Amino acid sequence: MPPFFGAIRSQDGVRFSVWAPASRRVELHLHDGAAAGVHPLSRNTEGLYETWIRGAAAGDRYTYALDDGDHLPDPASRFQPEGVHGPSQIVDPFSYVWHDSRWHPREPQDMILYELHVGTFTPAGTFDGVRTCLPYLRDLGITAIELMPVADFAGCRNWGYDGVALFAPSRAYGSPDDLRALVDAAHAHGLSVILDVVYNHLGPEGAYLPRFSPSYFTDRRHTPWGAAINVDGEDSGLVRRFVTDNACHWIREYHFDGLRLDATHALIDDSPKHIVQEIAEAVRAEAGRHILVHAEDHRNVAAMIEDVRIGGWGLDGLWADDFHHVVRSMVAGDTHGYYADFAGHTRELETIIHDGWLFSGEHSQHMNGPRGTHPGRVPMYRFVVCVQNHDQVGNRAFGERLHDEITPEAWRAVTVLLLTAPMTPLLFMGQEWAASTPFQFFTDLEPGLGQLVTDGRRREFADFPAFGDPEARERIPDPQAESTFLNSRLQWDERCAGNHARSLALYRALLALRLDHRALTGSDRTSASVTSPDDDTLVVRRSDGGATFWIVARFRSPGTINLADVSFAMSEELNRSALDLVLDTEHAEFTESPAAIDVAGPVITFQRPGAVILRDR
């Protein structure tokens, strides 16, 4: 569908469109250019104000005045060069010359996702900085990069989930054309690009959308971040149009290959068609090709990723957190908060690898009620799994990463499981080299709001045993401090030395195997062949009808596994006399002090946690 809101180039001028139903009069103030001056807008019956200005052009800056009030930026501004409180700038999306006309993304089953935050991924902290690292990501074996939200936010540093100018790439990272150049270059390197978008709330500073229409929000429902977005109440039609217009904007004007929808459980919608499904259908229609749509949703609702033909919503993927929670509970011993729902043993992992997630309607202690539905009709690749992501690292008090809290051998074992699982794996930036840098929570809000965020962040951890003492909470990094942001920037030089280089070598080897063998990519089957022969070991069988791989991962303690007995219990055929060792985590390339894993036919003896990959000839 054509763009609806904002300043849109049209013939030899620009069409301006803004929804302000509570206003009696709206004026457009063009601050520079050939058409500089004050221009009234015409109102229709829905409260949509429009005008077309001959001579207005890209680069001109403008604001709106509602009923002679303050000058406000456009809620659908394409760029905010002076920040979210300043004037908007007209952008011509067609002036950029694309080079990706022959681009064809990989199939969804082949996706290996790499989540990154533009501001902390490189020393430059810009779109151009990310662009310089694309050859590295391609050679690593990544097939899709996933950008944390880039919609503009208050200040110069933010995770991105406090976005308020939802159509405007943050000027902290570069210009709109810098973002286009990043996506264009990624396609040239064979990489898809997915964008994280937030439609469940706005940030606390610079959110002028409600000034134009209070109907954007509803007081009938609330989210953890305040009033809910009004997608099913009175006057919700144009709110839904604003959301779908924004989603299509990123596909149309920036050639993104997919969207990751943040916290869709907070998009509460009783409409016949949920807004999330409407977004997915809108962006695919806009592109004329398949656009990946993933969602973050802790409810484990299988319908979201079931096929539309059987009554589902048709999304391509759902962040399936149960995998992460069981792994972390098992190898790091976490028990607080939502980890209370997980025992942290391999039987839970067996269920997750077989079904996609653990909770399929069982009682959740953390949620105090049933959680989830059974995903028996869902292809395995539609479950997005990880052992790190921005939330699971950054929402810890000090932003520490999993590999900092467990032994290197346990880290290697969970890495093998992640990258050979039948689901879609997601890596968080720097994970591949076991980065020493944390990823901490940071903001740059005005001082009054900033202090509230700092206080709230420390209060958030008051119930954790380690932070019961107020003095202990004071040591939690201040989100408003620039040092918190700078501490979170990756140190690229470290990846070439010591255990960082060894971790990187393991990731490269595993990703090469996944890319080279169809049997090890995301599975379009609705279940997997897996068993847990004891509390410390998991065995996964992957096959494409030709090559057959056995992944044996031991997460705790020494032990011996007889694969012949395991295969018999799984009712799977094993060629005992023709098992080739493909990879073991105790190889000298991956560890400074190997403790050999003995593979004697089908009998595998671990001296400590580790993993092997075997192949039937």
Image (cartoon, rainbow, N blue to C red):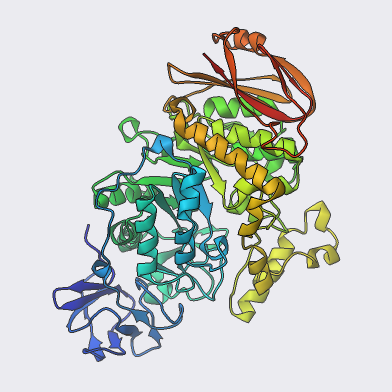
- Image quadrant assignment for residue 603: top right
* Residue 157 in the image, given as x and y percentages of width and height: 56, 71
Q: Residue furthest bottom?
A: 37
* Residue 92 in the image, given as x and y percentages of width and height: 26, 72
Q: Is residue 1 above or below residue 293?
A: below
Q: Which residue does the image show at 39% across and 72% down from the upper left?
A: 175
Q: Which residue does the image show at 44% across and 44% down from the upper left?
A: 143
Q: Is residue 57 above or below residue 544?
A: below
Which is nearer the eye, 583 or 482? Answer: 583
* Residue 107 in the image, given as x and y percentages of width and height: 36, 37
Which is nearer the eye, 11 or 282? Answer: 11
Does residue 367 appear in the picture of this structure? no
Which is nearer the eye, 362 or 380? Answer: 380
Q: Is residue 248 left or right of residue 490?
A: left
Q: Is residue 462 above or below residue 84?
A: above
- Image quadrant assignment for residue 605: top right
Q: Is residue 545 left or right of residue 94?
A: right
Which is nearer the eye, 349 or 448? Answer: 349
Q: Residue furthest left?
A: 11
Which quadrant is home to the N terminus?
A: bottom left
* Residue 183 in the image, given as x and y percentages of width and height: 37, 57
